[in-house]
Image: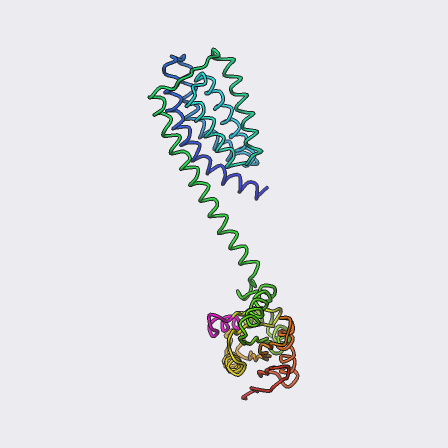
Amino acid sequence: MGKTGGKGLSLARRLYTSRTLGLALGLLLVSAAMYPLNPAPWVWVVMLLNAVLWPHLAYQWARRAQVPYHAEHRNLLVDAFLGGFWVAAMQFNPLPSATTLAMMAMNNVAIGGLRFLLAGTVAQILGIGVGLLIFTPAFIPQTSQMQLYACLPLMCLYPLALGWICFRQAHTLGRQKRELLALSRTDSLTGLLNHGAWKDQLEVEFQRCKRQQQGGAIALIDIDHFKTINDTYGHVAGDIVLRQLSKMLKQNLRAADVAGRYGGDEFCVILPDLPLTSAAAVMDALRDRFATLGYEQSPTLKVSLSIGLAAFNPAHTDATLWLNDADQALYEAKATGRNRVICCGDGSLHHELLDSV
């Protein structure tokens, strides 16, 4: 109900604006068509109530309804019924009648598509039927010049207003869709790409390297003894360490590099067009800077990184093989003492950069 209510109130606010404008312009049109017919005073009263009072009543009805979305759809059917009623009252004067029916049909299509257009058409037919019962059935075959000019404001301004409302709604929906897409690809704790999104980028980079015959490197980064950090200092401290590493990655990598959280305490980086030795230097500098960080909440906490690097191998047929090379290098870094960078290039492991401590 919360989602339906929010959507309904938003719809009611948009339609309040368009209904107020449309009925004000419609009053000019109907008045010009009705004036030569010398209608009874009560007809003028109903006309004014429809144009001036109904938009506000409809909005309040929707606002106070348990399900505003459904209430607003009922309001639109009332609009369609009243439009049909005034078409009969105007004795089917061609241009005012066609303008009234067309504007309402356009509104119904914009709000509810073909299905609601059909429902609105039925409501208009019922309104015409009631109008024929009240007014003398007649048909005016010609539209006067004054009536033509009275139709122009509604024909010109109302579609513009409705188009603007629809544009704003589409723009809002587009922005929300982009935000949801970004959230679905982002790790909520670190703000980096999540596991799936980073692997998608890895596949893109692998295909680019194959196509352009250019190299690059990928790195898998593991926070040493992370479980011990959580057990000793608490999970809050562990989260701070994860965020610190993600912050350092954002600050120290190139714009072209792609960092992500691979899972748990493991991070991953794509380093396009970077030779393995240069990538190793970058990662070792990162390892060294991260080891010097202090944590105010836990002054005794010291953290180190184990990093496995792998160069692009043209012989590989799949990006997962490239990732497997980096994983092997990371395993070797942890198995040989941690706090170091180990590289895998052309299928072989190299202890390129070891712990400098």
- Residue 256 painted magenta: yes
**Residue 57 percent coordinates (x, y):** 47, 29
Q: Residue at x 39, y 24 (%)?
A: 27
Question: Majority secondary structure of the magenta segment?
Answer: helix
Colouring scheme, one of rainbow, by chain, secondary structure, one colour: rainbow
**Residue 160 percent coordinates (x, y):** 40, 37
Magenta region: 244-257
Out of 181 and 244, give the one closest to the viewer: 181
Assign the N terminus to one quadrant of the image. top right
Q: Is residue 60 above or below residue 31?
A: below
**Residue 140 percent coordinates (x, y):** 42, 15
Assign the C terminus to one quadrant of the image. bottom right
Q: Is residue 348 above or below residue 235?
A: below
How many numbered discs sit on the rendered protein? 0
Residue 21: image quadrant is top left
Out of 265 and 94, give the one closest to the viewer: 94
Out of 30 and 93, give the one closest to the viewer: 93
Q: Residue furthest bottom?
A: 357
- Residue 119 painted magenta: no
Q: Residue furthest top?
A: 136
Residue 26: image quadrant is top left
Compared across the picture, whether 52 is left or right of 79 comes to left
Q: Is residue 169 above or below residue 29?
A: below
Compared across the picture, whether 17 is left or right of 192 comes to left
Q: Is residue 3 above or below residue 117?
A: below
Residue 36: image quadrant is top left
**Residue 225 percent coordinates (x, y):** 63, 78
Q: Residue at x 63, y 80 (%)?
A: 329
Q: Residue at x 47, y 73 (%)?
A: 254
